[in-house]
Amino acid sequence: MQRALSLDQSPSLSLTLPLFANVPFFGLLAAMLALYSGPELFNSRWHPATLAITHAWTLGIVGSAMFASLAHILAVACNVRIQVSRGQALAFWGLLSAGTLFLMTGFLSWQSWAYTLAGACLAFALGVYLLTAMLALWRSRRDVFRGAKEIVAPIRLALLGLLLTVSTGLAMLVALASEQAVANLLNLHMTMGLAAWAGLLLIAMSFQLLPIFQITELYPTPLVRWLPWVVGALLIAQWALASLPGSWLPVRDLVTYLIFLSYGLWAVITWARLWKRKRPTAGASTLFWYSSLSSLLIAVLLNFWTHNPAASNAELAIGVLLIMGALGSVVCGMLYTIVPFLLWREAQEHVSMDMDNTEHTRALLRLIPKTANYIPASTARAHWAWHSLSLILWTGASLGVGSFAWLAAPALLLSFATLSWNLWTAWQRYRHSLRAIRAYQAKHHIAAKPHCPES
């Protein structure tokens, strides 16, 4: 495993920023929908607003961030570049966003036209994404960094999980659009989406990024080598058992427990690595990692309680812990790491390197804020506090705590409002640095550096 990243190979800001901007947009949309729906949202996971908010999270928030981050991790950690133009990236973002909005509309209105449009947009966007990523991995199979081969395997498995998630989801959408009975694919769709696609990608990213950005010890070699394959084998077994009769239910439950325990093992080892990290202070991204791991471990414990008659809504609570907690926390923490870096790197692309007069070059570089200054640590921690509070409230409301149900939506709204403000602040500082660079170049008659946003 390598401890270095080829940051110069990171995709351009213009290719992935729209996807990262989806996170606060769909977060605010989900919070406002929850505020409008009220406490009845937590009565059942089949409530129309619950289904709409769930897919706002899985596609609009977590999905958008993971699609963008995968392009970065492949390029900087694996030497696998997904070659797309700015127009293609915007088309993918537009189709993904529109498909998510149509899907939410379909769940809220139960109109077949919304399901049809959602299926068309999502099938094309995700199909092209999968094909592009798989082709990039195939073409670069001999150029992968030697120390990154351990994370390429779980990424390939995660893409297979995404394919199965999309396939089962589209099959159910076709049934809804044609007003036919929906095939019994829901549990399989959820398992593949959370455990195969999102979970394996999260594991792959942690193997590479935690030792670098959190200054932790490397993961144990046997865990890195075998855990993704064990999880993959268990998921294949779950897929095969899904079509078998009810007499196989105990076996399916056993496989589900083993999947949860596998992720629980990873969470415990990751927690220990974070606790013993060499970085003295816990930044916002570290705090979000703790929230993610805590949510996952609570979900693992709660899974053993789902068959208890008193646990009527335990599955809804597990969904909150996995989607909003385990995955959503990592997404928020990742934004505080990757967005300032991308803005800093993009600002540097506008600096003309004058070899004859290095004083001008140094002066221009001083106009660019350091990555730590784009988003103040205090406001990033404030977002973590609001996010953690909303996570506690949503989990409690899902388990039947009535008073929490009234407070969950306002807390989520404040959480994403804080995130929106933080990202907007970072963007404004980036724009201010560009204006300062242009003013300095004009004052000293320095030719502006040609900038290619599609690189």
Image (tube, rainbow, N blue to C red):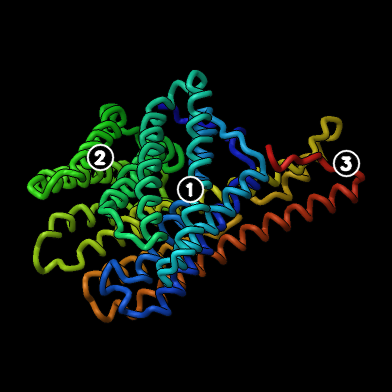
Question: Marks 3 and 1: in contact by CB < 8 Å?
Answer: no
Q: Position of residue 90 (x, y in %)?
A: 63, 49
| Residue 123 marker | 1
Mark 3 surroundings within 10 Å by alpha-carbon count, few (fewer than 14), some (14 through 19), many (20 or more): few
Q: Earlier in the sequence, mark 1 or mark 3?
A: 1
The residue at which mark 3 appears reads as 447
Amino acid on which the number 1 mark rests in the picture: Ala
Query: What is the distance, in whole Å, between disc 1 and disc 3 at their CAs?
Result: 45 Å
Of the two numbered discs 3 and 2 in the rendering, the one whose residue sits closer to the viewer: 2
Residue at image coords 49%, 51%: 122
Q: Residue at x 63, y 43 (%)?
A: 88
Residue 90 vs 75, above or below: the answer is below
The kind of secondary structure element at disc 2 is helix
Q: Residue 435, position in %: x, y? A: 78, 55
Name the quadrant of the C terminus: top right
Residue at the (56%, 53%) spot, across then down: 95
Q: Nearer the viewer, mark 2 or mark 1?
A: 1
The residue under label 2 is which amino acid type? Leu
* Closest to the observer, 413 or 216: 413
* Residue 114 shows in this picture: yes
Q: Marks 2 and 1, how far apart in space? A: 23 Å
